[in-house]
Image (spheres, rainbow, N blue to C red):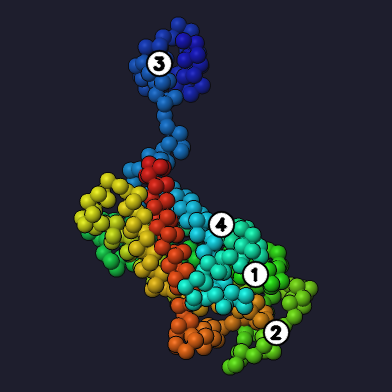
Amino acid sequence: METERAFLQEQGLIPKDTPVEFGTRHFSAAAKGKQKDFGDVESYIGNKQKEPGFWEKSKQRAKSDRSSWDYVLRSGLAGGIAGCVAKTAIAPLDRVKILFQTSNADFKKFAGTPMGLLQATKVIWQQQGPIGLFQGHSATLLRIFPYAAIKFMAYERLEGLIMPNKKDRTPGRLFLAGSLSGVASVFFTYPLELIRVRLAYQTKTTERTSLREVIKLIYQEGHQPPIRTANFSQSALTVPREQLLSSRIPVVKTLAPFYRGFSVTLVGMIPYAGVSFLTYGTLKRHISDFIPMMADHKTISDLTCGAVAGAVSQTASYPFEVIRRRMQVGGVKGGTGSLSWKDAVLRIWSEGKGRAGRGFYTGITIGWLKVVPMTSLSFATWQWSKRLMEI
């Protein structure tokens, strides 16, 4: 009784001069004049102790209101986890694909052949060991968590704004929400992607650089004139690498060098993210109509819809990805000057091996092998994490 009396006095519910004889089932006259009559003090104290905390309230809001920020932020966390899981699963394929796309001198001969993937993987294993297949993966994880989190979080928010009801889930709106979420995510994480590609491009026979040196090289390349040669001669591309590393960073700082290839990335992201979410959302909505068992197997349904979405979106956007990769490594492919969009397109076109435009789909097989399982795992892990969070 004394503890309950002290508690109520501390909360200001009864005067401090309330008599000791104050009972647990009634208030003194003085208390009744100022405070509400809770009737049963013991019940009141129990209710106060059972009141949900901040995280529990947030969880309840997330479960009851899909348009709330509590739901969106939790969905973003689930998306970040999903991105890391998916990227780790396909990291070796990603490394080989980057080497093929950028026409790395040591691996160009393997591109376009049926056994090229296995041969390139074997060479990396022999030269660098199994860790070589995950080169640059730490930078990948630093980028992919915020990238995936922002993408899924933005999509959920846009979905709530432009598709509040099921009847509003039209193909056009699904595509729009997916495209805008992809653009938002790549805008905030593109510098990390550029650094990752540079690290993955390096091989044993090229001079290795540390993360700090890669960042400095990218920064310095922004102050070199763009490559503007018709025949792409070696003399026009060559600038001593040591000169860049030893030179002082200019006082006027800019992030522009870290957004090399960003314009083509935006153009490619629109069909990639848009088609990905459009395909996944459409299949997810109708797959149980054609395959009834999918209604009771949500994870299998997510994996299947995600795989199809990955294949379709990769095919639609792959040429833009090849151009972007070539622009990203323009400074290390024989020199340090930046490579413009036009020059990247002309160079890729000239590498078609007798078939104009073939170069824009170099490594597409690896792209499918990489993106299909990655997108499948990404969507499935995202949805599974949301179910685990009970949202």
**Residue tagged by mark 2?**
238
Q: Earlier in the sequence, mark 2 or mark 1?
A: 1
Which secondary structure, mark 4?
helix
**Residue tagged by mark 1?**
202
- Which dot, 4 or 1, sits closer to the camera? 1
- Name which residue type carries label 4: Leu
Whole-Å distance between the Cαs marked 4 and 3?
52 Å
- Disc assigned to residue 141: 4
Q: Residue at x 36, y 55 (%)?
A: 303
| Residue 293: image location, x then y, percent | 25, 49
Q: Residue at x 40, y 66 (%)?
A: 273
Q: Earlier in the sequence, mark 3 or mark 1?
A: 3
Q: Earlier in the sequence, mark 4 or mark 3?
A: 3
- Name which residue type carries label 2: Thr
**Residue tagged by mark 3?**
42
Residue 29 sits in quarter: top left
Q: Earlier in the sequence, mark 2 or mark 3?
A: 3
- Disc assigned to residue 31: none
| Residue 379: image location, x then y, percent | 39, 55
- Name which residue type carries label 1: Gln
Whole-Å distance between the Cαs marked 2 and 1?
18 Å
| Residue 138: image location, x then y, percent | 60, 57
Query: Can residue 335 be seen here?
Result: yes
Q: Does residue 175 sit above or below 17 in this rendering?
A: below
Relative placement, left or right, of 290 versus 91 is left
Relative placement, left or right, of 171 versus 179 is left
Whole-Å distance between the Cαs marked 2 and 3?
83 Å
Query: Can residue 262 be seen here?
Result: no
